Image (cartoon, rainbow, N blue to C red):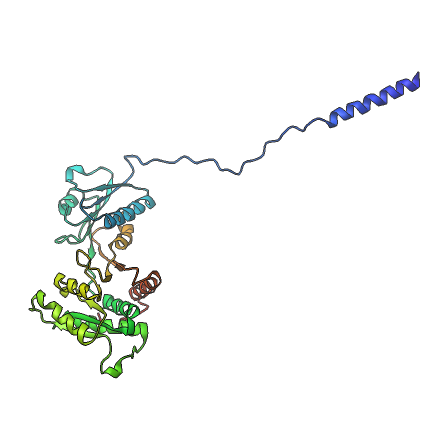
Amino acid sequence: MRVKSALFFIFAIVLLSACSLGKRPEPTAVPSDTPTALPTVAPTDSTPLAVLLMPADMDKATSDAYQTAVYNLTQQSGMRFQVRNAMTPQDIDPGLKIVVALAPDPGVAALAAAAPQVQFLAINIPGISAGNNISTLATNSRADIPAFVAGYTAAMVTNEYRIGMLFPKGDASAQAAAAAYANGMSDYCGLCQPLYFLGYGFPQFQDIPADEPKSHFPAYADILILQHRVDTIYLYPEITAKELTDYLSSTGTYMIGTVVPNPKPGTWIMTIQPDEVKAIGNAWPDLVAGKGGQNVQSPLGLADLDPTVVTPGKQRLVQQVLDDIQAGRIATGVTP
């Protein structure tokens, strides 16, 4: 009887152990790596406001560039952003802090007088001077920098360095630019001596009398094209006339300049002009800080590039040269 009781007791213990081993463990909570989304703060009427005043008929590419630049600056500064085509003193928002105004003049002087607490940046608006709460973009008057970059680029994209320049006769600034153009070519290719055995080298230059009718400009271009077989020409701004650019385009001659005709000629390969979008970025910290009356220097930039001629790799080289000149790392060889 005792043996049976002992056996029964052992069997019960084994059975209970087996039941215990068959139970599934309770699941435990696993910490998630996904962060909890933070609430975003929507702009309110008390958030400072920046307005871009621009004409409604501006070409889309330029308009988009300005809007994107100013929008990004406002986001970095925690400001609201609006684009308007017109504004009157009665339209001034209580939270308005900055206005970037493009030509034609939307009435900057009257707006600035009505809102002395607002900083205005006037871009290419004739008759507006820096002072009080109005800042302006300074005109880049150095003719040597774009000429140097043009010479460097022309030498890079032209076979046998057959490059030339047209400029107004008797203009001291244009003559300095011609020297810088030659220096830019030399910076790219050293002495560039091929074809000296023909009795001439490159670049070739041709001046045009100041009183010459624009209809005669193509004849001066022919001196470079026919006599010296020039394939790329740098046009000084004062002689960039439609009569000339249309003719050069018809001959297949590449053109570089600082003022692009409208419409752009088919063989126009590059424009070297003030980079006003970058200038807005340079001026922005002072505008946010309430420092008005600034004359903001506009850096030069590249535009209207023909990617089949000035390919992306060549463009990077040209941009680096332009950046180095403006940073003082490369000298044009001409006293500005």
**28 left or right of 198 in image:** right
Disc count in the image? Answer: 0
Figure check: 17 above or below 45: above
**207 left or right of 72 in image:** left
Q: Percent x, y for residue 320?
A: 33, 64
Residue 71 location, quadrant: top left
Quadrant containing the N terminus is: top right
Q: Percent x, y for residue 274?
A: 23, 58
> In front: 327, or 285?
327
Q: Can residue 334 be seen in this view?
A: no
Figure check: 183 above or below 72: below
> In front: 171, or 254?
254
Q: Percent x, y for residue 241?
A: 13, 62
Q: Can residue 96 be seen in this view?
A: yes
> In front: 223, or 280?
223
Which residue is most to the top?
1
Tell me which residue sits at (54%, 36%) in the image.
Answer: 32
**138 left or right of 72 in image:** left
Tell me which residue sits at (58%, 34%) in the image.
Answer: 30
Residue 83 location, quadrant: top left
Figure check: 215 above or below 91: below
Quadrant containing the C terminus is: bottom left
Q: Percent x, y for residue 264?
A: 20, 57
Tell me which residue sits at (19%, 39%) in the image.
Answer: 92
